Every structure is written in C-alpha cells, then in structure tokens.
C-alpha cells in the first residue's frame, strides 16, 4: 500500500489532472501529448522499458530479493526515476563518460535520499502541504536561473530550500535512530538495496537506448541528401561501435564529409579524411582534435 507521502503525490497528481481536463485549451493539448507518447517510437520505448523492469522484478523474485510488499516502491521508482534515467540518456547527445554519470545519478537523490527521506513519512495533511511548497521553491529557483540580477532572490530561495531539507533530514535521523526496522524486507537497508539493483539492472537497457538514439540521429544527418545506404550505416557502426559520444562528436563536426559516400568503403575513406582534417586543424589552432 502507498504510504502518506505517496498518497499525497497521487492526490496532487489527480487534482492536476482534473484541472487540466476541466480546461478546454489544456484538454486539447493533452490529446496531442498522448498521441506523441503513444506513438511508434516513444510508445515502443516505454513498452520496452516496462518489460525490462518487469524482467528485473521477476529475476529478483526468484532470488528472494523482491516480494509483493515492494510493489508500490517499485512502481513509484519506475515512474519517477526509471523513465527519467532513460529520457536523460537518450537526449544527452553531446556528453561523455556516460557510465560514470549514470551511476552517480542513480545513487544520488533518486536512490539514497529517495529512500532516506521516505523512511519516516509525515502525516498525510503535512505531506499535502509540504509537496507543493517544495515544488514551488524548486520552480522559483528554475525561473530565477543564473541571471546576476536574481542573485539575491536565488540565494534566499536556496536558504529556504536548504533549511527545509535539513529539517526533514533531522527528522529522518531521529526516526532512524529510534527504529528497529532497518534490515528487514520493509527496512531502510532493504529499500535502499531495492532501488540500487533496479537502477543498476536498468543500465544495459539505458545504454542500449542511448546508443540506438545516437545512431538514429547519425543516420538521419548523413542521409539528408542521398538517402539511406546500408554500406554507409554499416561503416558508421563498425567504426564507432558502442562509443556513442565519439559518434555524436564526429557527426556534429564532420557529417558533411559523408554527403557523397554511399558504399562501405567510401564511407570509411570519408571518415578517415575527416579525422586527418581535424588533426590538421587542431595542430594549427593548438586545440584537441574533434
């Protein structure tokens, strides 16, 4: 069963959904969003993600790592973190060190603090007030942005947010010290373990999704003029393999080298020419080659 914090989330989500559906302009936009989400690419990705997480849960159940009491936590993790991890991986075309950043993101707020701050849940009325308050603070910080003229406002908001989180953390520490339920299947240690293996088990899927998105973008950018060529695609795959960052970096700077390449051999030769040109430019400018 959902705890008070999860109930509060469901209540606010339901209230937001009712408000959106009650407004004609917003309601008309919902249909477009649903068509986008349920479309072939995004819909298939979501379905595959759900199947992967179900497979994780099935395997964990066979190993006695998971039972039905963890259903709510698993569902909330999948919605709140699983989809976000996949979306971030697919959309971060220009960033390297994917594995390190994924592990850090998985073990950051979404895992450790997510469990720690949920160990001792406040009453439902307090949770109903606390959640929109935190959401409003974070939203105001995003709106304030990095602009220098908003520095004082941003500093004030950071102080309020920091004090709120510190107060919640202190409450959690007191509750944790006085609790005997730490290592059981409903305890803090096991909840932490639950989200750790869910996140780590999702790594192959997220990496595959990122690689697929990277190659799909590369194919699109190199097929703009002369269409799809199997030899060109095969040359890109055999040249860059799982190195999604290097592929994205090459496509950003040198995709035009492949505009006339159609066969496997022509594409490999064009890639080599682009790399030689990049080295020459780097040596002249004193920069790292792209």
Image (cartoon, rainbow, N blue to C red):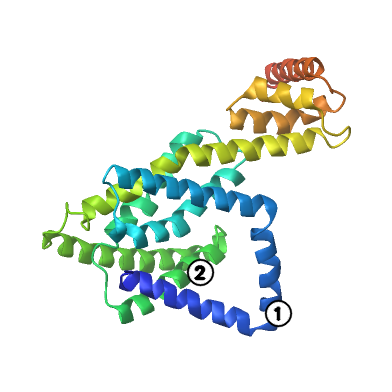
Image location (x, y in percent) of residue 194? 31, 50
User: In screen coordinates, is 135 left or right of 5?
Assistant: right
Q: Quadrant of residue 119?
A: bottom left
User: In screen coordinates, is 184 left or right of 196?
Assistant: left
Please, is residue 258 above or below residue 108 in the view? above
Q: Residue at x 31, y 66 (%)?
A: 163
Earlier in the chain: of badge 1 and badge 2, it is 1
Please give the label number shown on residue 140: 2
Please, is residue 207 above or below residue 257 in the view? below
Q: Is residue 5 visible?
A: yes
Image location (x, y in percent) of residue 66? 30, 51
Disc 2: CA contacts within 10 A as few (<14), some (14-19) or many (>=20)? some
Judged from the image, the secondary structure of the residue bearing numbered disc 1 is: helix
Q: Nearer the viewer, residue 250 or 265?
A: 265
From the image, tell me which residue sits under label 1: 25
Judged from the image, the secondary structure of the residue bearing numbered disc 2 is: helix
Q: Residue at x 50, y 36 (%)?
A: 98
User: In screen coordinates, is 48 left or right of 72?
Assistant: right
């Amino acid at each position: 069963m959902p705890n008070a914090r999860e109930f509060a989330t469901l209540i606010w989500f339901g209230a937001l959904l009712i408000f959106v559906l009650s407004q004609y302009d917003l309601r008309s936009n919902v249909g477009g969003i649903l068509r986008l989400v349920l479309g072939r690419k995004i819909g298939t990705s979501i379905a595959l993600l759900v199947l992967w997480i179900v497979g994780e849960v099935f395997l964990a159940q066979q190993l006695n790592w998971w039972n039905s009491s963890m259903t709510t936590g698993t569902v909330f993790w999948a919605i709140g973190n699983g989809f976000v991890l996949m979306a971030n991986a697919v959309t971060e075309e220009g960033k390297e060190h994917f594995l390190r950043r994924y592990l850090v993101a998985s073990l950051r707020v979404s895992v450790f603090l997510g469990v720690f701050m949920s160990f001792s849940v406040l009453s439902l009325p307090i949770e109903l007030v606390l959640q929109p308050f935190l959401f409003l603070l974070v939203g105001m910080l995003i709106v304030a942005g990095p602009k220098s003229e908003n520095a004082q406002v941003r500093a004030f908001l950071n102080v309020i947010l920091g004090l709120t989180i510190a107060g919640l953390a202190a409450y959690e520490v007191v509750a944790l010290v006085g609790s005997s339920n730490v290592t059981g299947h409903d305890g803090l240690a096991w909840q932490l373990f639950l989200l750790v293996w869910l996140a780590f088990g999702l790594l192959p899927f997220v990496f595959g999704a990122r690689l697929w998105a990277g190659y799909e973008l590369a194919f699109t950018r190199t097929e703009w003029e002369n269409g799809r060529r199997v030899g060109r695609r095969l040359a890109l795959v055999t040249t860059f393999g799982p190195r999604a960052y290097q592929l994205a970096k090459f496509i950003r700077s040198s995709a035009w080298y492949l505009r006339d390449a159609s066969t496997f051999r022509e594409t490999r030769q064009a890639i080599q020419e682009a790399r030689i040109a990049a080295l020459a430019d780097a040596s002249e400018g004193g920069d790292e080659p792209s």
